[in-house]
Amino acid sequence: MGRWEGIEEYICVVETGSFTAAAEQLGVSKSYVSKQVSQLEDRLGVRLLQRTTRRLTLTESGNTFFGYCKDMSDQFDRAESTLSDMQKSPRGTLKLALNSRYGTQYMAAAVAEFSRKYPDLTVEVHSNFQDVDLLSGSYDLTVRYDKLEDSTLVARRLGGHALCLCATSEYWEVHGKPTCPEDLLQHNCLTTPDRFWFFDNPDHRDIVKVKVKGNWTSEDGANLLAAAKASIGIAQLPHFYIRNAVSRGELEILEDQDWSRYYRIAWAVYPNTRHLSAKVRYFIDFLVLYLHKLQDNPDSETFLE
């Protein structure tokens, strides 16, 4: 017998004043209510109600126990109400894991805007250059890119952004511009440690994967941007990340090359749960809109009003 079993019936009997009225309110038989209360008394080892043909009265123990039961029932009602409210509007704590390679100018800006829009929500942002274990870290959601590995996690496509090749005009003048992916092997490429760059195939077939080489590697996009601006080599960086440097003339994008861009897909990844919380659901919907606006207007400083 469960610890709560019989208590709801007991509360209802006390509040309505009879087993018959309690049964009608609960939508069950009178005999069922009587049996549940009797089993509750047996389990507790005390008499809760004095039963006569005319009335029911609470024993001293029954009165004390009723007070505790009523408090627990009220707390449960408040808990249900709170959960219902949380499903209607983001509340509680949203724990996010973001890739920090470009996060300060990309996803972090989106998270800040979301937090401003929903001030009742507490946001915890954890940044790491490597993908985290959502379950062991108790994260609500992470954002990952490109092709996802099979897992028990759930993923929703958010959109994406374009990566392009860039360098200073000085570098282009000295070393020339590549005309195909293979030409990159003759250039100093500023890359992440894996040294792989991807490009969209103009023929709409599988993407082109090139292993480049160079004397500068970093997980941090800010370091790659600084090296590119110093004319050390070519970098492959998101358009939104370099647009200010391009507008100031500090960098030039390799244009007029139909092979030189790569559209990187962003995914919201979260644990597989039966009921998705409002805070996660709202945040995912927000990110979809945010990235669509970023894609439609990449030169805008404010993506969402």
Image (cartoon, rainbow, N blue to C red):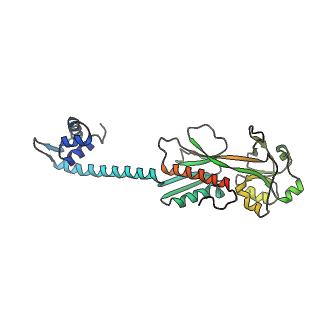
Nearest the eye: 18 or 303: 303
Hey, which quadrant is residue 106 in on the image?
Answer: bottom right
Q: Is residue 178 left or right of residue 3?
A: right
Q: Residue at x 61, y 57 (%)?
A: 108
Hey, which quadrant is residue 38 in on the image?
Answer: top left
Q: Is residue 289 visible?
A: yes
Q: Residue furthest front?
A: 296
Q: Can you say which quadrant of the picture contains the C terminus?
A: bottom right
Q: Position of residue 302 (x, y in %)?
A: 63, 61
How many tags in the picture? 0
Q: Position of residue 298 (x, y in %)?
A: 69, 56
Nearest the eye: 27 or 147: 27
Q: Can you say which quadrant of the picture contains the N terminus?
A: top left
Q: Residue furthest bottom?
A: 248
Q: Is residue 51 left or right of residue 96?
A: left
Does residue 290 sit above or below 206 in this rendering?
Answer: below
Does residue 112 sit above or below 34 in this rendering?
Answer: below
Q: Position of residue 214 (x, y in %)?
A: 81, 50
Q: Position of residue 224 (x, y in %)?
A: 75, 55
Q: Is residue 238 left or right of residue 44?
A: right
Q: Is residue 203 left or right of residue 102?
A: right
Q: Residue at x 45, y 52 (%)?
A: 88
Q: Residue at x 20, y 47 (%)?
A: 16
Q: Is residue 102 visible?
A: no
